[in-house]
Each structure stands twice: as C-alpha cells, then as structure tokens.
Image: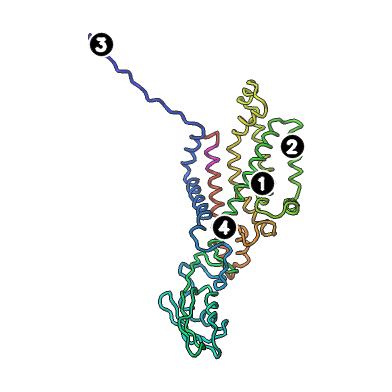
Amino acid sequence: MTDIAQTPVVTPETKGRSLFQLAAMRFKRNRAAMASCFMLALIALFSFLGPFFVPHTYDQVFPSYVNTSPSLEPRPDTSTLQGVVEGVAARARVTLKEFNLEGETFTATITSEQPIDARATRYFDRANEFRDTQVVATEDDGKTLKVTGQVNREYFPFGTDSNGRDLLVRVMLGGQISIAVGLLASLVSLGIGVIYGATSGYIGGRVDNVMMRLVEILYSLPFVFLVVVLVVFFGRSFILIFLVIGAVEWLDMARIVRGQTLALKRREFVGAAQALGLTDWQIIRRHIIPNTIGPVIVFVTVVVPKVILLESFLSFLGLGVQAPLTSWGALISEGANNIQSAPWLLIFPAIFFVLTLFSLNFIGDGLRDALDPKDR
C-alpha cells in the first residue's frame, strides 16, 4: 500500500482584540451615537472654523441693519436705496435732485443754496449701504455736486440682533465659548473628582468618612455665593468661569467614583495586586481608576450640557461672559426677551444648543452600552 503524504494544514493566526477595540466596535454599531458624533463634529467645525470664512466680526455693528430678519438675499434691497439716499442727503443738509443705479454703481446729484463741501461724500460712506463715494462733477459754483460710488452688499443669513451685529458670527462665537467652557470645566471636574473619589473609596475607614463629610460641607455652600466670592478675589475672567464650575461639578463625580470603587476593591484582581505588593496609590492608578472609566465617561457627557447651562446662568447674572463676547446661553437669554419682535434671535442659538445637547446624550448612551461589562 502506498503511503500518501499529507500536507499539514496551517491555520491562520488569530489576532486578538483588546477591550478597547471591542468597545469601539460596539460603539460603531450604534447608529444614533455615530450620527451624534458626526453632528457634534459639524457643530464644532461650524463654531471654530466658520469665522474664518465670514467677512464680519462678532463685535462689528451695522447701524442700518438693526433687527434685520434672516435672508439669503443680499442687503440692501434695491427698492429701499432711494429712501436711504434721501436720508443721507437730509443728514448732510443737502437736497437730493437725482439718483440712478446701474448694477452695483450709483450716481446721485445733490444741491444746496450754499456751496457744498466735497467732504459731504463722507455721509454716504458712513451709511452701511454705500462705499467709495467720490465727487465726479461740480456745477453752479459748487452748489450742485454729482457723486458716484459703489453699493455695499451684505449677507445676513441668520439676521442681525438689536445692536445691528451679525447673528451668524455671534452664534459661532457662542459655540466656541460654550463648547470650550463645557469641555474644560468637565475636564477639571473629571480630574479632581476621579482622584478624590477613588482615594476615598479605596482607603475607606476614617479617611473616607472625613473626605465625604468635606464633600457634604461643600454641597451645602450656595453655588452663586461661591462664584461671587471667587470673582471678588480673582476678578472676572474667562478662565475663572470654567475653574469655578469645575470646582463645583467634581462633587458629583467624586461620589460616583467612590461608589464604583467600593464595589471594585473587593474584586479578585485587587486582592491579587495587593498580594503582589503594590502600594495603595499603584492599585488606585492601575486598577481602580481604569475600571471606573465607563461610568465616568457616560457621566461626562451629561456634565457638559449641564455646565453650558450653568455658564449661561452666570452670564445672565453678570458674572460670566460679558459683551461683546457671548455664548449660546447668553444669546438664548437675549432672544427670549425679543421673541415677539425678533424670534430668530432665539431660534438659531437654541437650535445649535439643542442639537449639541441631544448629540451628547446619544453619545453617552452609546458609550454606556459599549462599555457595559455585561455586554462583553
């Protein structure tokens, strides 16, 4: 019998996946969470990169366009230019004799009983509707001037506020400040609360009792009173806002991490780490804190919109962001006061705030499902 040589079957090496990779795969399967990440990225790009593509600044005032409604059409309307020129002539104390418009170039003839100073063209340039006005002809010994210039077209897709400022740019600026305050204050509360809560829960005993009593004492202090005291001592600044908010929000974070630590320190891997001779700080840093990341990350997605609301509350009291700077909360507060006469002042910042809030909530739900140990 002939022996048939058998070729050994080589099985491909199976590549293992880390817990982070498995959690990322579960998170990517959550369509709502992925759509929320995409929406949040668009809002961040709109807020931080948008001002580079808009010709206006957040503090630029357009006196001719106060409370202008949103429109994709350029301003001013051609039908209103006649009335604008008449108003300019009245302010210059001259009489408008003739006004013609050809494309973007206008020609006006003004007269007066006395010789007209050529500097009267400044009145045209001071109006937001015109620019580059100059005298092209002089008649009647200077009593009649023929001037020409360009019509200055402006776009206000979000409209303007009660001071004549472009709401589009101010919503972008509000997004920058609200997102920055939300993230920075959350990071402050995350850094303090996680270390404080993990230390208190792991050490236990009298140390835990003293540390938690300190948390309860800080809970009893009025938040507004604490902010007023800090503002009086350190002055009003943007950095102080997120430091104050973060210094208050870490209390909730510490209690959550402490509760997770009390359950984790009785687990087998902590006992094994103790048997290997690791110090308490090494166990907290290597084993306790990493295993509390899941609930902590989910809680952070709830803290960010809460911090944004707190910032708007401080701005309303005059302790937060001050004009001409603004935030979504301050814009919403201003829009609520003008909801009947100018509803767009409330609608646009509220849309971005609500979208950010929903996106963070859906991302938090996705992270909770992806990091849940029961689903591994």
- Left or right: where 139 falls relative to 214: left
Q: CA distance from mark 1 to mark 4?
A: 21 Å
Of callouts 1 and 4, the N-terminal one:
4
Instruction: Report the mark closest to the observer, 3 or 1.
Output: 1
Comparing 126 with 281, the one in front is 126
Asked if the residue at tag 2 contacts the one at tag 3, i.e. Cβ–Cβ closer than 8 Å, the answer is no
Q: Is residue 128 left or right of residue 184?
A: left
**Residue at x 56% of width, y 52% of height:** 357
Residue drawn where x is 51% and y is 53% of the image = 43
Mark 3 vs mark 2, foreground winner is: 2
Q: Earlier in the sequence, mark 2 or mark 4?
A: 4
Marks 2 and 1: in contact by CB < 8 Å?
no
Determine whether 360 is above or below 3 in the image.
Answer: below
Label 4, secondary structure: give it.
helix
Q: Which residue is mark 3?
A: 3
Q: Nearer the viewer, mark 2 or mark 4?
A: 4
Residue 132 picture location, percent across and down: 48, 74
Point out the image quarter for the N terminus.
top left
Q: Which residue is mark 1?
A: 246
